[in-house]
Image: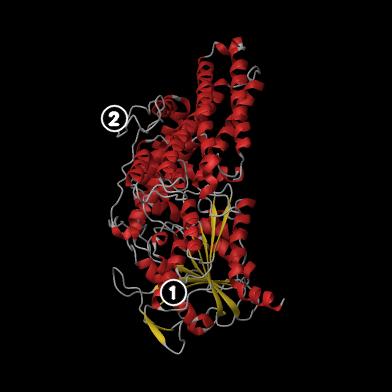
Amino acid sequence: MTYSRMDHSVVFTTLEVVCVEAISALSGNVGLMQNEATAQLLATLRRIYEHGRAVEALVSGFSAVYHHYDFDAETPANGYRSLVKVVRSCILHIIQKARYISSNCGGIFFRVEHNTGEMEAYCTALCQLRALLYLAQRLLNNNKHGQLYSWEDESLSQKFVREYATMHKACFYGRCLGFQFSPALRPFLQTIVISMVSLGENFEKQQTKIGRAALSFLTSGKYVMDPELRGVQFERITQNLDMQFWKTFWNITETELLTGLASIASNTVQVNMTLTVPGKPLSVPLASDPNLSVSVSPPIAHWGPGPVHVRLISYCLRPGQDNAELLALSRSEGPQLSLPAGFRPQRGILSPWLLIHFHGGGFVAQTSKSHESYLKSWSKDLNVPILSVDYSLAPEAPFPRALEECFYAYCWALKNCHLLGSTAERVCLAGDSAGGNLCITVSMKAMSHGVRVPDGIMAAYPATLLTMDASPSRLLTLIDPVLPLSVLNKCINAYTGLDTGSLQPMQQLDTLAALGRDTAHLLENIRQEASNWLQSLFDPTSSEAARSSTSSRNAVPGRQQSASEFPEGFEPLRSGCPAEIQIPCTPIMRNPFVSPLLAPDSLLKGLPPVHLVASGLDALLDDSVMFAKKLRSINQPVTLTVVDDLPHGFLSLVQLCKETKDASDICVGQIKKVFEQDLSANNSIDE
């Protein structure tokens, strides 16, 4: 992410040169000039040229000052840098395509319409990115020096939400999908988006899980062949479908098929069991005086005392893990011990280390099952047993239920470490996204109860601020296929209790009669969907409708947009389906146990070493940067490592490419620092 101002100058100069060359090559081709698409392509290249000149001035301004917002000189990362890098990636794609046009427009295989569509898509993306730079410039001008969030100016956050609600975003989910990320991830992101829009199209139909899956598979074909239609549908879905859809989609990773495929590529562990810990008061030693104890109540929020579900993963079988006391807590989810037939278990000794894990999923979805693939690898690489907590999910279980369950599971693990294959001489908390938030808040809760705090925290891309405050990295939610702002808003509202609507359970196939009705209904829908799909292949009007909706974004009735928000003569494209996002106003969002970034120094003093691992292209990057700065300002031990070119949630993508595997290895290295900290200190004393 460290590009000099000279590098930027070269990139923008090259952009101007290739645009001029492409315009000249097209204008000199008499045969092409008679094609209407050629006229569109020429106009697009001229617009790109104009956008490029305006964007260069903005980028130069950011590159002169964005180092002031880094955590330190060795960690050049913040939302301003991220925006500049995304713009640069977009321009580099345009340069590559413009060069292709210049070199091949005279050839017999040159497809004018295809290349026009490509350049129009990236021209639109550059236009929208230009708008984001103007918004970031306003943040830069209004926030305090070194401050990335607009806490003291609510109008900036309101402006941010209003722009998201009205700005056209479909271009980032069509032909340009994932251009800012590692090339190895783009096919996966395309698959995810196609799956999402296909599921979204059929979600509200009265179908069973089987019916939805079959229809989604069938309708996905048109979104493969028509990227513009895919982009329009993805924008509609992310802005309009409710939390039930998102829980359903994210929980697809919990299905036996996907978990089975993931397990094939993951390490084999000898212990992988799910446990139900009864909700009974615990007596835990006081950290200040182990001869005294404190009583820890079971989780009680919202519906009273209840059990906590956890998963124990261990690469080898350790003492205690086959103890009858532990096995009595096991739940039925396949074999209690993951041993192949005829395999004699490899027995290990009690580990001095224990890793306690809280999974991500926006506080609303997934369990440890979605994350066990990388946890199995961690257990092997670290040679440590791992306890992953399946906390209750929002909106059915809003704050503080999940925090209470995670804290209770932490205390139970300390008290019963002998059953988990560990002496717990050193304990590390690890989590990603929402789980990273819980790692921090559980440690804060341990301090407030006088309980032993963990020896360290590894939080990957944690959510440390659960508000709708604007920051430069959060502007990326306008283009991010993984974490759009409307989805982030839904997760925040669910966890903080603002979305209290109960979710209806999915219908089950309990009888043969129900199966027969569903099958008949499914076949009828398949017939209809097949007819529609085939018609779309031969009837270009469906694609034209998507393109026309894209080209008419500038006129959205009733949108609240002041002409002074952007420079005279410039206006970003507007959405044909504005989102309805309200900025909630509730004290709970600023509760320090919800948003630890807002915690007073007294609640953060005494935290163990915190190791943050973030992504430079994640909308939550500024959460990590500002939290690291806050801890450093009160002399708390903290490190921040930022990986490049990966989206939010990269730990769940660990098996896809080398970049995600390397990022996971960085997380393992930070956890190992926690476990080996005393050893390192002793070695330095001996020397």
Measured as percent of width and height from the top left, residue 536 is found at: 44, 29
Measured as percent of width and height from the top left, residue 577 is found at: 34, 35
Question: In front: 461, or 326?
Answer: 461
Element assignment for label 1 = helix
Residue at horizontal 34%, vertical 47%? Answer: 153
Element assignment for label 2 = loop
The quarter of the picture where the C terminus appears is bottom right
Any part of residue 124 in sight: yes
Any part of residue 513 in sight: no
Question: In front: 537, or 472?
Answer: 472
In the image, residue 612 above or below residue 103: below
Q: Amino acid at mark 1?
A: Ala
Separation of residues labelled 2 and 1 (CA atoms): 52 Å
Residue at horizontal 47%, vertical 55%? Answer: 626
Write down the residue under mark 1. Answer: 409
Q: Are marks 2 and 1 in contact (CB under 8 Å)?
A: no
Colour convention of the picture: secondary structure
Q: Amino acid at mark 2?
A: Pro
Measured as percent of width and height from the top left, residue 508 is found at: 36, 58
The quarter of the picture where the N terminus appears is top right
Question: In front: 562, or 171?
Answer: 562
Write down the residue under mark 2. Answer: 557
Give left or right: position of 499 versus 422: left
Residue at horizontal 39%, vertical 26%? Answer: 568
